[in-house]
Image (cartoon, helix red, strand yellow):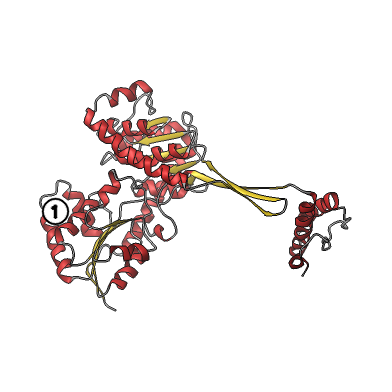
Amino acid sequence: MTITHLKRGKPEADRAADDDKTRATVETILKDIQANGDAAVRALSERFDGYAPDSFRLNLAQIEALIATLTPQEIADIKFAQEQVVKFSQAQRESMTDTEVETLPGVILGHKNIPVQSVGCYVPGGKFPMVASAHMSVATAKVAGVPRIVACTPPFKGQPNAAVIAAMHFGGAHEIWVLGGIQAIGAMALGTETMEPVHMLVGPGNAFVAEAKRQLFGRVGIDLFAGPTETMVIADDTVDAELCATDLLGQAEHGYNSPAVLLTTSRKLAEATLAEIDRLLAILPTADTARASWQDYGEVILCDTYDEMLDVANDIASEHVQVMTDRDDWFLENMTCYGALFLGPRTNVANGDKVIGTNHTLPTKKAGRYTGGLWVGKFLKTHSYQRILTDEAAARIGAAGSRLCMLEGFAGHAEQCNLRVRRYGGVNVPYAKAAPVLPCETPAEKA
């Protein structure tokens, strides 16, 4: 087994040091927001975005005025993309059903899927206005039935971005705030004098946004850790360097710290892709950002076999995995750790980012090992319930429960069960003692 790194990114120790600096900055800012509310939020917006309007929340007239600046084609494109996301979200929602079952005669168990009651949707937009992120969070929350959807996005070039605001409005946001970064995340989670706190935070963002969500998790729910974009291309000789290089740089342009990894069995393809990346960086308008990411976070890994590529891919657990090989379905069947798969050369990560309908808020930093991406189910809580319909069932369950409670030493728990055995089974169980085996219990229960 031979795995060769033709290019490595920044060492893990250096990446960890960057994370430590981010963690400290976020902690300080969140404490400021909690202590000083609106005043802190305003000061932070002025400091980071140079933006301090009379109100960060837009009213309907302001929203409609911004939408009016868009062309009919721009509005049509936004609505088309949103329709694709909504269609897929509705199909996913329909796959989630409430359940009720009679597990024993007279014993009813069930669960209900209940929407989270308030959600804060963060839509990035300081560097690039992420119109599609509004579909992924706001529109999906609406499909789930969330009754209060708060949407925040930073100003773009000093003003609200009309396309982002339109997508939020069309998607069903109840409140739209022009507020970015840690101050937006902190305000939504902690609340201020003018913003009621939400129950859950969702949406992608930069390292500071992701860290703020991490630190606030527990006080509020979060969708997942969706930090700086990651992409991986798994390829063999069935595709060429132009495809691989374009798909790597297409995601590297997100930011200075966006990992991009080529995983291949072909040394010829690997070397050609390295050369093609250099060529494209000379003409790509966003080359300054993409070059920084590729220099510090780009990797090219050469493997001997497809099994080796599978092992490396599952270990890295990249957010986006573009598979272009002679066995794409094999990777679909065998990959276990990733955010989303893009199978074959006809599709690409940008499709998923903007228009095709799957959600683009996906796990990063190896979180794909234990969670998938944002989807309608993230906005739903599955709550169980139980009821007992007959006296016999109450006594039967109560007797077994009493004995199990006493086995663990919980006398108070046992009395909850014993009281039912006495009232509904007619058996006088001594106080804080284990119930006897009842005639209605089955042979297995009596064993």
The crowding category of the residue bearing disc 1, from other C-alpha atoms within 10 Å (few below 14, some 14 to 19, many at least 20), is some
Task: Tell me what residue is drawn at x 30 percent, y 72 percent.
Answer: 308
Task: Tell me what residue is drawn at x 19 percent, y 59 percent.
Answer: 244
Residue 126 is situated, as x and y percent measured from the top left of the image, at 29, 39
Residue 412 is situated, as x and y percent measured from the top left of the image, at 78, 54
Kind of residue at badge 1: Leu
For the image, the number of numbered tags is 1
Residue 95 is situated, as x and y percent measured from the top left of the image, at 47, 48
Residue 379 is situated, as x and y percent measured from the top left of the image, at 47, 43
Task: Tell me what residue is drawn at x 56 percent, y 46 percent.
Answer: 98
The image quadrant that residue 341 belongs to is bottom left
Q: Can residue 221 be seen in this view?
A: yes
Q: In the picture shown, does residue 339 fall above or below 112?
A: below
Question: In terms of secondary structure, where does tag 1 sit?
Answer: helix
Asked whether 415 or 194 is in front, the reply is 415
Looking at the image, the residue that sits furthest to the top is 61
Q: Is 418 placed left or right of 56 in the picture?
A: right
> Which quadrant of the figure contains the N terminus?
bottom left
> Which quadrant of the figure contains the C terminus?
bottom right
Disc 1: which residue: 281
Looking at the image, the residue that sits furthest to the front is 105
Q: Can residue 125 be seen in this view?
A: no
Asked whether 184 or 146 is in front, the reply is 146
Q: In the picture shown, does residue 251 fall above or below 147?
A: below
Q: Is 409 placed left or right of 25 in the picture?
A: right
Asked whether 161 or 361 is in front, the reply is 361
Q: Is 190 placed left or right of 432 in the picture?
A: left
